[in-house]
Amino acid sequence: MNLLTLVQAAVVSVTLFSQESLAFPQHVPLAGLAEHEVQSMTPMLKAVIPPSPPGPLKFDGLKLVDDSKHPWMPLKRGDLRGPCPGLNTLASHGYLPRNGVATPSQIITAVQEGFNMENKLAQLTTYFAMIGDGNLITDLVSIGAKTPLTGMDPPPPAIVGGMHNHGTFEGDASLIRGDAFFGDNHSFNQTLFDQFKEFSQKYGNGFYNLTVAAELRFHRIQQGVATNPQFSFFGLRHLTAYAEATFPASLFVDGRKQGRDVGQLDMKSAESFFKDMRFPKGFHRSSSPVVIAGLGDLFAAHPFMPGKNNGTHVDSFVVDDSLGSLLDVCSIYTGFVSSTVRTLYPNPTGVLRRNLELNLQFLFEGLSNFGCNQIFL
Ligand code: HEM
Ligand SMILES: *[C@@H]1O[C@H](CO)[C@@H](O)[C@H](O)[C@H]1NC(C)=O
Ligand SMILES: *[C@@H]1O[C@H](CO)[C@@H](O)[C@H](O)[C@H]1NC(C)=O
Ligand SMILES: *[C@@H]1O[C@H](CO)[C@@H](O)[C@H](O)[C@H]1NC(C)=O
Ligand SMILES: CC(=O)N[C@H]1CO[C@H](CO)[C@@H](O)[C@@H]1O
Protein backbone atom coordinates (compact mmCIF):
# COMPACT_ATOMS: atom_id res chain seq x y z
CA MET A 1 0.00 0.00 0.00
CA ASN A 2 1.07 3.52 -0.58
CA LEU A 3 1.44 4.95 2.90
CA LEU A 4 1.93 8.52 1.88
CA THR A 5 -1.28 8.53 -0.15
CA LEU A 6 -3.07 6.98 2.77
CA VAL A 7 -1.88 9.61 5.20
CA GLN A 8 -2.65 12.39 2.72
CA ALA A 9 -6.14 10.97 2.27
CA ALA A 10 -6.46 10.85 6.03
CA VAL A 11 -5.44 14.46 6.41
CA VAL A 12 -7.86 15.53 3.66
CA SER A 13 -10.68 13.64 5.28
CA VAL A 14 -9.98 15.23 8.65
CA THR A 15 -10.12 18.65 7.03
CA LEU A 16 -13.34 17.89 5.22
CA PHE A 17 -15.08 16.09 8.05
CA SER A 18 -13.49 17.67 11.08
CA GLN A 19 -16.58 16.93 13.18
CA GLU A 20 -16.84 13.44 11.83
CA SER A 21 -13.73 11.52 12.75
CA LEU A 22 -15.53 8.27 11.96
CA ALA A 23 -15.65 9.14 8.25
CA PHE A 24 -12.13 7.79 8.18
CA PRO A 25 -12.11 3.99 7.91
CA GLN A 26 -11.43 2.76 11.44
CA HIS A 27 -9.95 -0.57 10.41
CA VAL A 28 -7.05 0.77 8.32
CA PRO A 29 -3.97 -1.12 9.53
CA LEU A 30 -1.24 0.82 11.30
CA ALA A 31 1.46 -1.76 10.65
CA GLY A 32 4.29 -0.42 8.55
CA LEU A 33 3.56 3.24 9.28
CA ALA A 34 6.24 5.54 10.57
CA GLU A 35 5.75 7.19 13.96
CA HIS A 36 4.71 10.55 12.47
CA GLU A 37 2.23 8.83 10.17
CA VAL A 38 0.62 7.06 13.11
CA GLN A 39 0.50 10.37 14.95
CA SER A 40 -1.22 12.20 12.11
CA MET A 41 -3.81 9.45 11.89
CA THR A 42 -4.46 9.00 15.60
CA PRO A 43 -6.87 11.94 16.01
CA MET A 44 -9.17 10.34 13.43
CA LEU A 45 -9.31 7.02 15.24
CA LYS A 46 -11.66 6.11 18.05
CA ALA A 47 -9.27 4.63 20.63
CA VAL A 48 -10.43 1.74 22.79
CA ILE A 49 -8.87 -0.53 25.39
CA PRO A 50 -8.90 -4.01 23.84
CA PRO A 51 -10.93 -6.37 26.05
CA SER A 52 -9.75 -9.83 27.06
CA PRO A 53 -10.72 -12.41 24.44
CA PRO A 54 -13.73 -14.70 24.97
CA GLY A 55 -13.27 -18.11 26.56
CA PRO A 56 -14.45 -21.50 25.24
CA LEU A 57 -18.07 -22.13 24.20
CA LYS A 58 -20.51 -23.07 26.96
CA PHE A 59 -22.08 -25.65 24.67
CA ASP A 60 -19.37 -27.06 22.42
CA GLY A 61 -21.21 -29.94 20.76
CA LEU A 62 -22.92 -30.65 17.45
CA LYS A 63 -25.23 -27.90 16.26
CA LEU A 64 -27.06 -26.74 13.15
CA VAL A 65 -25.30 -23.51 12.21
CA ASP A 66 -26.99 -22.83 8.87
CA ASP A 67 -30.00 -21.72 10.89
CA SER A 68 -32.78 -19.17 10.42
CA LYS A 69 -31.00 -16.58 12.58
CA HIS A 70 -28.00 -16.66 10.25
CA PRO A 71 -29.29 -16.52 6.68
CA TRP A 72 -26.75 -16.28 3.89
CA MET A 73 -26.96 -12.96 2.08
CA PRO A 74 -25.25 -11.78 -1.09
CA LEU A 75 -22.64 -9.06 -0.81
CA LYS A 76 -23.69 -5.46 -0.61
CA ARG A 77 -21.68 -2.57 -1.94
CA GLY A 78 -18.71 -1.94 0.32
CA ASP A 79 -18.78 -5.34 2.07
CA LEU A 80 -15.22 -6.65 2.48
CA ARG A 81 -14.19 -10.24 1.93
CA GLY A 82 -10.69 -11.65 1.87
CA PRO A 83 -8.44 -14.68 1.56
CA CYS A 84 -10.01 -16.80 4.33
CA PRO A 85 -12.93 -18.92 3.18
CA GLY A 86 -13.90 -19.61 6.82
CA LEU A 87 -14.19 -15.95 7.82
CA ASN A 88 -15.82 -15.03 4.48
CA THR A 89 -18.54 -17.61 5.11
CA LEU A 90 -19.09 -16.42 8.68
CA ALA A 91 -19.52 -12.83 7.47
CA SER A 92 -21.94 -13.82 4.72
CA HIS A 93 -24.09 -15.61 7.31
CA GLY A 94 -23.94 -12.80 9.86
CA TYR A 95 -21.84 -14.62 12.48
CA LEU A 96 -19.42 -11.77 11.80
CA PRO A 97 -20.53 -8.26 10.86
CA ARG A 98 -21.63 -8.59 7.24
CA ASN A 99 -19.44 -5.69 6.16
CA GLY A 100 -16.35 -7.77 7.01
CA VAL A 101 -14.94 -5.46 9.70
CA ALA A 102 -14.72 -6.99 13.17
CA THR A 103 -13.03 -6.96 16.55
CA PRO A 104 -10.79 -9.87 17.55
CA SER A 105 -13.39 -10.90 20.15
CA GLN A 106 -16.09 -11.04 17.47
CA ILE A 107 -13.83 -13.22 15.29
CA ILE A 108 -13.06 -15.65 18.11
CA THR A 109 -16.74 -15.90 19.04
CA ALA A 110 -17.74 -16.42 15.40
CA VAL A 111 -15.22 -19.17 14.56
CA GLN A 112 -16.17 -21.01 17.75
CA GLU A 113 -19.92 -20.61 17.29
CA GLY A 114 -20.01 -21.26 13.53
CA PHE A 115 -17.28 -23.90 13.12
CA ASN A 116 -16.42 -25.07 16.63
CA MET A 117 -12.80 -24.02 16.28
CA GLU A 118 -11.05 -24.71 19.59
CA ASN A 119 -10.64 -21.67 21.84
CA LYS A 120 -6.82 -21.40 22.02
CA LEU A 121 -6.39 -22.07 18.30
CA ALA A 122 -8.98 -19.38 17.54
CA GLN A 123 -7.24 -16.95 19.88
CA LEU A 124 -3.77 -17.59 18.49
CA THR A 125 -4.85 -17.29 14.85
CA THR A 126 -6.92 -14.19 15.46
CA TYR A 127 -4.18 -12.24 17.24
CA PHE A 128 -1.58 -13.11 14.62
CA ALA A 129 -3.97 -11.54 12.08
CA MET A 130 -4.95 -8.62 14.31
CA ILE A 131 -1.37 -7.63 15.06
CA GLY A 132 -0.31 -8.02 11.44
CA ASP A 133 -3.31 -6.53 9.65
CA GLY A 134 -5.58 -4.71 12.10
CA ASN A 135 -5.89 -1.28 13.63
CA LEU A 136 -4.60 -1.71 17.16
CA ILE A 137 -5.94 1.65 18.30
CA THR A 138 -9.58 1.00 17.33
CA ASP A 139 -9.44 -2.79 17.91
CA LEU A 140 -10.83 -3.46 14.41
CA VAL A 141 -9.57 -5.60 11.56
CA SER A 142 -11.08 -6.23 8.16
CA ILE A 143 -11.19 -9.79 6.83
CA GLY A 144 -10.20 -8.46 3.42
CA ALA A 145 -9.55 -5.29 1.57
CA LYS A 146 -11.88 -5.23 -1.32
CA THR A 147 -15.14 -6.88 -2.20
CA PRO A 148 -14.64 -9.44 -4.97
CA LEU A 149 -17.92 -8.30 -6.55
CA THR A 150 -17.57 -7.39 -10.17
CA GLY A 151 -19.83 -5.52 -12.54
CA MET A 152 -20.96 -2.97 -9.96
CA ASP A 153 -21.62 0.51 -11.13
CA PRO A 154 -19.93 2.54 -9.82
CA PRO A 155 -17.23 0.04 -8.82
CA PRO A 156 -16.83 -0.54 -5.08
CA PRO A 157 -14.25 1.62 -3.33
CA ALA A 158 -10.88 -0.03 -2.85
CA ILE A 159 -9.93 0.26 0.79
CA VAL A 160 -6.33 -0.51 1.54
CA GLY A 161 -5.36 -3.11 4.07
CA GLY A 162 -6.84 -5.90 6.11
CA MET A 163 -6.20 -9.59 5.91
CA HIS A 164 -5.18 -9.62 2.32
CA ASN A 165 -2.16 -7.49 2.98
CA HIS A 166 0.54 -9.62 1.49
CA GLY A 167 3.30 -10.97 3.69
CA THR A 168 1.92 -10.50 7.20
CA PHE A 169 -0.57 -13.36 7.40
CA GLU A 170 -1.74 -13.74 3.81
CA GLY A 171 1.00 -15.46 1.85
CA ASP A 172 2.05 -17.51 -1.15
CA ALA A 173 1.11 -21.08 -2.07
CA SER A 174 -2.54 -20.82 -1.01
CA LEU A 175 -4.61 -23.71 -2.23
CA ILE A 176 -7.19 -21.86 -4.30
CA ARG A 177 -5.92 -18.28 -4.49
CA GLY A 178 -3.01 -17.05 -6.58
CA ASP A 179 0.23 -15.57 -5.23
CA ALA A 180 0.25 -11.77 -4.87
CA PHE A 181 3.06 -11.66 -7.44
CA PHE A 182 0.57 -12.62 -10.15
CA GLY A 183 -1.53 -9.58 -9.33
CA ASP A 184 -4.46 -11.10 -7.47
CA ASN A 185 -3.87 -12.52 -4.03
CA HIS A 186 -7.46 -12.85 -2.90
CA SER A 187 -9.98 -13.95 -5.51
CA PHE A 188 -11.33 -17.45 -5.85
CA ASN A 189 -9.40 -18.90 -8.79
CA GLN A 190 -11.29 -21.49 -10.84
CA THR A 191 -8.11 -23.02 -12.29
CA LEU A 192 -6.75 -23.60 -8.80
CA PHE A 193 -10.07 -24.95 -7.60
CA ASP A 194 -10.09 -27.39 -10.54
CA GLN A 195 -6.65 -28.50 -9.37
CA PHE A 196 -8.06 -28.93 -5.83
CA LYS A 197 -10.77 -31.20 -7.30
CA GLU A 198 -8.27 -33.10 -9.43
CA PHE A 199 -6.08 -33.84 -6.39
CA SER A 200 -9.14 -34.81 -4.35
CA GLN A 201 -10.09 -37.24 -7.11
CA LYS A 202 -6.60 -38.69 -7.40
CA TYR A 203 -5.68 -39.03 -3.72
CA GLY A 204 -9.06 -38.96 -1.95
CA ASN A 205 -11.39 -40.80 -4.28
CA GLY A 206 -13.36 -37.59 -4.87
CA PHE A 207 -13.04 -36.19 -1.35
CA TYR A 208 -10.54 -33.76 0.18
CA ASN A 209 -8.89 -35.38 3.20
CA LEU A 210 -5.51 -35.14 4.95
CA THR A 211 -3.88 -37.42 2.37
CA VAL A 212 -4.98 -35.00 -0.36
CA ALA A 213 -3.92 -32.06 1.81
CA ALA A 214 -0.36 -33.37 2.07
CA GLU A 215 -0.05 -33.77 -1.70
CA LEU A 216 -1.73 -30.51 -2.68
CA ARG A 217 0.16 -28.49 -0.07
CA PHE A 218 3.45 -29.78 -1.47
CA HIS A 219 2.35 -29.28 -5.07
CA ARG A 220 1.36 -25.63 -4.50
CA ILE A 221 4.78 -25.00 -2.92
CA GLN A 222 6.51 -26.53 -5.92
CA GLN A 223 4.34 -24.47 -8.28
CA GLY A 224 5.37 -21.34 -6.40
CA VAL A 225 9.07 -22.15 -6.54
CA ALA A 226 8.84 -22.93 -10.25
CA THR A 227 6.72 -19.94 -11.38
CA ASN A 228 7.02 -17.05 -8.91
CA PRO A 229 10.44 -15.35 -8.73
CA GLN A 230 9.30 -13.61 -5.54
CA PHE A 231 7.98 -16.80 -3.97
CA SER A 232 8.16 -16.41 -0.21
CA PHE A 233 7.45 -19.19 2.23
CA PHE A 234 8.86 -17.83 5.36
CA GLY A 235 8.28 -17.31 9.11
CA LEU A 236 4.60 -17.40 10.10
CA ARG A 237 3.62 -18.50 6.58
CA HIS A 238 5.39 -21.82 7.13
CA LEU A 239 2.97 -22.58 9.94
CA THR A 240 -0.21 -21.10 8.44
CA ALA A 241 0.24 -22.76 5.02
CA TYR A 242 0.36 -26.24 6.55
CA ALA A 243 -2.30 -25.47 9.16
CA GLU A 244 -4.79 -24.06 6.64
CA ALA A 245 -4.43 -27.11 4.43
CA THR A 246 -5.88 -29.22 7.26
CA PHE A 247 -8.90 -26.94 7.87
CA PRO A 248 -11.09 -28.03 4.93
CA ALA A 249 -10.81 -31.67 6.12
CA SER A 250 -11.82 -30.79 9.67
CA LEU A 251 -13.80 -27.55 9.86
CA PHE A 252 -15.67 -27.76 6.52
CA VAL A 253 -16.91 -31.33 7.05
CA ASP A 254 -20.44 -31.63 8.43
CA GLY A 255 -20.35 -32.63 12.11
CA ARG A 256 -23.02 -35.31 11.60
CA LYS A 257 -20.59 -37.43 9.56
CA GLN A 258 -19.53 -40.62 11.28
CA GLY A 259 -17.03 -43.43 10.97
CA ARG A 260 -15.13 -43.47 7.70
CA ASP A 261 -16.83 -40.27 6.48
CA VAL A 262 -15.17 -38.14 9.17
CA GLY A 263 -12.46 -35.91 7.68
CA GLN A 264 -13.69 -36.37 4.07
CA LEU A 265 -14.94 -33.19 2.38
CA ASP A 266 -17.14 -33.57 -0.72
CA MET A 267 -16.56 -31.24 -3.66
CA LYS A 268 -20.01 -29.66 -3.66
CA SER A 269 -19.52 -28.51 -0.06
CA ALA A 270 -15.98 -27.34 -0.84
CA GLU A 271 -17.27 -25.20 -3.69
CA SER A 272 -19.98 -23.76 -1.46
CA PHE A 273 -17.41 -22.53 1.10
CA PHE A 274 -14.60 -21.48 -1.22
CA LYS A 275 -16.60 -19.94 -4.04
CA ASP A 276 -19.98 -18.88 -2.63
CA MET A 277 -18.83 -18.17 0.97
CA ARG A 278 -21.85 -20.14 2.07
CA PHE A 279 -22.62 -23.07 4.38
CA PRO A 280 -23.90 -26.11 2.49
CA LYS A 281 -27.65 -26.36 3.15
CA GLY A 282 -28.34 -27.55 6.71
CA PHE A 283 -24.65 -27.50 7.69
CA HIS A 284 -23.81 -28.67 11.22
CA ARG A 285 -20.54 -27.60 12.82
CA SER A 286 -18.07 -30.16 14.15
CA SER A 287 -19.36 -32.20 17.09
CA SER A 288 -16.33 -31.28 19.24
CA PRO A 289 -13.83 -28.38 19.33
CA VAL A 290 -11.38 -28.58 16.42
CA VAL A 291 -7.64 -28.29 16.97
CA ILE A 292 -5.09 -28.55 14.16
CA ALA A 293 -4.92 -32.28 13.65
CA GLY A 294 -2.42 -34.04 11.42
CA LEU A 295 -0.03 -31.11 11.00
CA GLY A 296 2.99 -33.29 11.77
CA ASP A 297 1.88 -35.93 9.26
CA LEU A 298 1.26 -33.31 6.58
CA PHE A 299 4.77 -31.97 6.98
CA ALA A 300 6.34 -35.41 7.30
CA ALA A 301 4.75 -36.53 4.00
CA HIS A 302 6.81 -33.90 2.11
CA PRO A 303 9.05 -31.94 4.48
CA PHE A 304 9.67 -28.53 2.98
CA MET A 305 11.58 -25.99 5.01
CA PRO A 306 10.85 -22.24 5.01
CA GLY A 307 12.69 -19.97 2.60
CA LYS A 308 12.40 -17.83 -0.51
CA ASN A 309 13.18 -17.49 -4.17
CA ASN A 310 15.72 -14.73 -4.71
CA GLY A 311 13.35 -12.14 -6.17
CA THR A 312 14.47 -12.19 -9.78
CA HIS A 313 14.55 -15.87 -10.73
CA VAL A 314 12.29 -18.84 -10.35
CA ASP A 315 13.82 -22.05 -8.99
CA SER A 316 16.24 -20.06 -6.86
CA PHE A 317 14.76 -21.18 -3.53
CA VAL A 318 17.06 -20.92 -0.53
CA VAL A 319 16.10 -22.27 2.87
CA ASP A 320 15.84 -19.58 5.54
CA ASP A 321 14.50 -20.43 8.96
CA SER A 322 15.65 -17.25 10.66
CA LEU A 323 12.01 -16.46 11.51
CA GLY A 324 11.38 -19.98 12.72
CA SER A 325 9.77 -23.07 11.26
CA LEU A 326 6.80 -25.21 12.13
CA LEU A 327 9.16 -27.83 13.53
CA ASP A 328 9.09 -25.57 16.59
CA VAL A 329 5.99 -23.39 16.89
CA CYS A 330 7.75 -21.30 19.57
CA SER A 331 10.41 -20.32 17.04
CA ILE A 332 7.68 -18.89 14.79
CA TYR A 333 6.22 -16.95 17.70
CA THR A 334 9.67 -15.64 18.64
CA GLY A 335 10.45 -14.63 15.05
CA PHE A 336 7.07 -12.93 14.72
CA VAL A 337 7.39 -10.83 17.87
CA SER A 338 11.10 -10.07 17.92
CA SER A 339 11.44 -9.38 14.20
CA THR A 340 8.16 -8.95 12.28
CA VAL A 341 6.33 -6.97 14.98
CA ARG A 342 9.31 -4.71 15.63
CA THR A 343 9.58 -3.98 11.92
CA LEU A 344 5.84 -3.31 11.56
CA TYR A 345 5.72 -1.03 14.61
CA PRO A 346 9.18 0.52 14.77
CA ASN A 347 8.61 2.91 17.64
CA PRO A 348 5.14 2.54 19.14
CA THR A 349 4.13 5.10 21.73
CA GLY A 350 1.03 6.06 23.71
CA VAL A 351 -2.18 4.19 23.02
CA LEU A 352 -0.61 2.24 20.17
CA ARG A 353 2.08 0.90 22.47
CA ARG A 354 -0.36 0.02 25.25
CA ASN A 355 -2.68 -1.78 22.84
CA LEU A 356 0.15 -3.56 21.05
CA GLU A 357 1.36 -4.87 24.40
CA LEU A 358 -2.13 -6.10 25.27
CA ASN A 359 -2.52 -7.78 21.88
CA LEU A 360 0.87 -9.47 22.28
CA GLN A 361 -0.23 -10.71 25.69
CA PHE A 362 -3.42 -12.21 24.18
CA LEU A 363 -1.34 -13.79 21.39
CA PHE A 364 0.97 -15.37 23.94
CA GLU A 365 -1.96 -16.70 25.97
CA GLY A 366 -3.23 -18.36 22.78
CA LEU A 367 0.02 -20.35 22.77
CA SER A 368 -0.39 -21.67 26.29
CA ASN A 369 -0.37 -25.31 25.11
CA PHE A 370 3.12 -24.94 23.64
CA GLY A 371 5.23 -23.83 26.62
CA CYS A 372 7.01 -21.00 24.79
CA ASN A 373 9.02 -18.27 26.50
CA GLN A 374 7.19 -14.95 26.35
CA ILE A 375 8.81 -12.20 24.27
CA PHE A 376 8.15 -8.57 25.17
CA LEU A 377 8.47 -5.48 23.00
C1 HEM B 1 -9.50 -17.75 13.81
C2 HEM B 1 -9.54 -16.77 12.96
C3 HEM B 1 -9.05 -16.91 11.53
C4 HEM B 1 -8.26 -16.01 10.90
C5 HEM B 1 -7.72 -14.71 11.48
C6 HEM B 1 -8.01 -16.51 9.56
C7 HEM B 1 -7.26 -15.86 8.60
C8 HEM B 1 -6.88 -16.41 7.39
C9 HEM B 1 -6.04 -15.77 6.42
C10 HEM B 1 -5.46 -14.36 6.55
C11 HEM B 1 -5.87 -16.64 5.40
C12 HEM B 1 -5.05 -16.43 4.14
C13 HEM B 1 -3.73 -17.09 4.18
C14 HEM B 1 -3.29 -17.42 2.78
O1 HEM B 1 -3.67 -18.49 2.27
O2 HEM B 1 -2.57 -16.61 2.17
C15 HEM B 1 -6.62 -17.83 5.72
C16 HEM B 1 -6.67 -18.96 4.92
C17 HEM B 1 -7.51 -20.02 5.16
N1 HEM B 1 -8.41 -20.14 6.18
FE1 HEM B 1 -8.63 -18.87 7.74
N2 HEM B 1 -8.66 -17.70 9.41
C18 HEM B 1 -9.33 -17.97 10.58
C19 HEM B 1 -10.16 -19.06 10.81
C20 HEM B 1 -10.51 -20.00 9.87
C21 HEM B 1 -11.56 -20.99 10.00
C22 HEM B 1 -12.50 -21.10 11.20
C23 HEM B 1 -11.54 -21.74 8.87
C24 HEM B 1 -12.42 -22.87 8.44
C25 HEM B 1 -13.63 -23.01 8.87
C26 HEM B 1 -10.47 -21.24 8.02
C27 HEM B 1 -10.12 -21.78 6.81
C28 HEM B 1 -9.09 -21.31 6.02
C29 HEM B 1 -8.60 -22.00 4.84
C30 HEM B 1 -9.10 -23.34 4.29
C31 HEM B 1 -7.60 -21.20 4.30
C32 HEM B 1 -6.73 -21.51 3.08
C33 HEM B 1 -7.30 -20.98 1.81
C34 HEM B 1 -6.42 -21.31 0.64
O3 HEM B 1 -5.35 -21.92 0.82
O4 HEM B 1 -6.78 -20.96 -0.49
N3 HEM B 1 -9.89 -20.17 8.65
N4 HEM B 1 -7.24 -17.67 6.93
C1 LIG C 1 -5.56 -18.58 -11.66
O1 LIG C 1 -4.41 -19.36 -11.43
C2 LIG C 1 -3.79 -19.82 -12.59
C3 LIG C 1 -2.69 -20.80 -12.18
O2 LIG C 1 -1.81 -20.20 -11.25
C4 LIG C 1 -3.26 -18.63 -13.39
O3 LIG C 1 -2.62 -19.05 -14.57
C5 LIG C 1 -4.45 -17.74 -13.74
O4 LIG C 1 -3.98 -16.56 -14.36
C6 LIG C 1 -5.25 -17.38 -12.50
N1 LIG C 1 -6.49 -16.75 -12.93
C7 LIG C 1 -6.87 -15.56 -12.52
C8 LIG C 1 -8.19 -15.10 -13.02
O5 LIG C 1 -6.21 -14.88 -11.73
C1 LIG D 1 -8.21 -40.20 1.86
O1 LIG D 1 -8.94 -40.92 0.90
C2 LIG D 1 -8.24 -42.00 0.31
C3 LIG D 1 -9.15 -42.61 -0.76
O2 LIG D 1 -10.35 -43.00 -0.19
C4 LIG D 1 -7.84 -43.00 1.37
O3 LIG D 1 -7.09 -44.04 0.79
C5 LIG D 1 -7.04 -42.30 2.44
O4 LIG D 1 -6.76 -43.21 3.49
C6 LIG D 1 -7.81 -41.12 2.99
N1 LIG D 1 -6.98 -40.42 3.93
C7 LIG D 1 -7.44 -40.01 5.12
C8 LIG D 1 -6.45 -39.33 6.01
O5 LIG D 1 -8.59 -40.13 5.48
C1 LIG E 1 18.98 -15.30 -8.47
O1 LIG E 1 19.38 -16.59 -8.83
C2 LIG E 1 19.82 -16.70 -10.19
C3 LIG E 1 20.18 -18.15 -10.45
O2 LIG E 1 19.21 -19.02 -9.97
C4 LIG E 1 20.98 -15.79 -10.46
O3 LIG E 1 21.35 -15.87 -11.84
C5 LIG E 1 20.60 -14.37 -10.10
O4 LIG E 1 21.71 -13.51 -10.25
C6 LIG E 1 20.10 -14.30 -8.67
N1 LIG E 1 19.63 -12.96 -8.39
C7 LIG E 1 19.90 -12.34 -7.26
C8 LIG E 1 19.28 -11.00 -7.08
O5 LIG E 1 20.59 -12.84 -6.37
C1 LIG F 1 1.14 -6.57 -1.97
C2 LIG F 1 0.09 -7.24 -2.80
O1 LIG F 1 0.40 -7.89 -3.76
N1 LIG F 1 -1.15 -7.05 -2.44
C3 LIG F 1 -2.18 -6.99 -3.44
C4 LIG F 1 -3.29 -7.96 -3.12
O2 LIG F 1 -4.34 -7.81 -4.06
C5 LIG F 1 -4.91 -6.53 -4.09
C6 LIG F 1 -6.04 -6.57 -5.06
O3 LIG F 1 -5.65 -7.12 -6.30
C7 LIG F 1 -3.86 -5.50 -4.49
O4 LIG F 1 -4.44 -4.20 -4.46
C8 LIG F 1 -2.73 -5.57 -3.51
O5 LIG F 1 -1.70 -4.69 -3.95
Image (cartoon, rainbow, N blue to C red):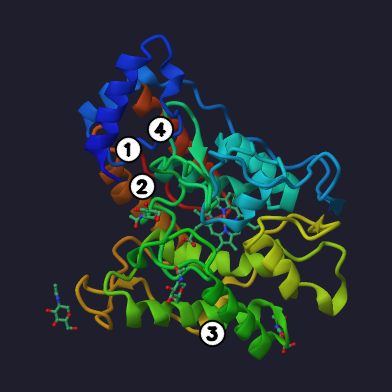
Q: Does the CB distance between marks 1 and 2 fall below 8 Å?
A: yes
Answer yes or no: is residue 349 visible: no
Label 2 to label 3, Cα distance in Å? 29 Å
Question: Going 30% across and 46% down the picture, which residue do you hit?
Answer: 1
Give the Cα separation between the discs numbered 1 and 2: 7 Å
Q: Are marks 4 and 1 in contact (CB under 8 Å)?
A: yes
Residue highlighted by disc 3: 301
> What is the residue that sits farthest to the front in this orientation?
153
Instruction: Tell me residue 66's x, y (percent).
Output: 81, 50
Residue at the disc numbered 4: 357
Residue 150, relative to residue 346: is it above or below? below
CB under 8 Å between callouts 2 and 3?
A: no
Whether residue 181 is visible, yes or no, is yes
Q: Local crowd at mark 4 within 10 Å, few (<14), some, or many (≥20)?
A: some
User: What type is the residue that disc 2 sits on?
Assistant: Val
Marks 4 and 3, how far apart in space? 38 Å
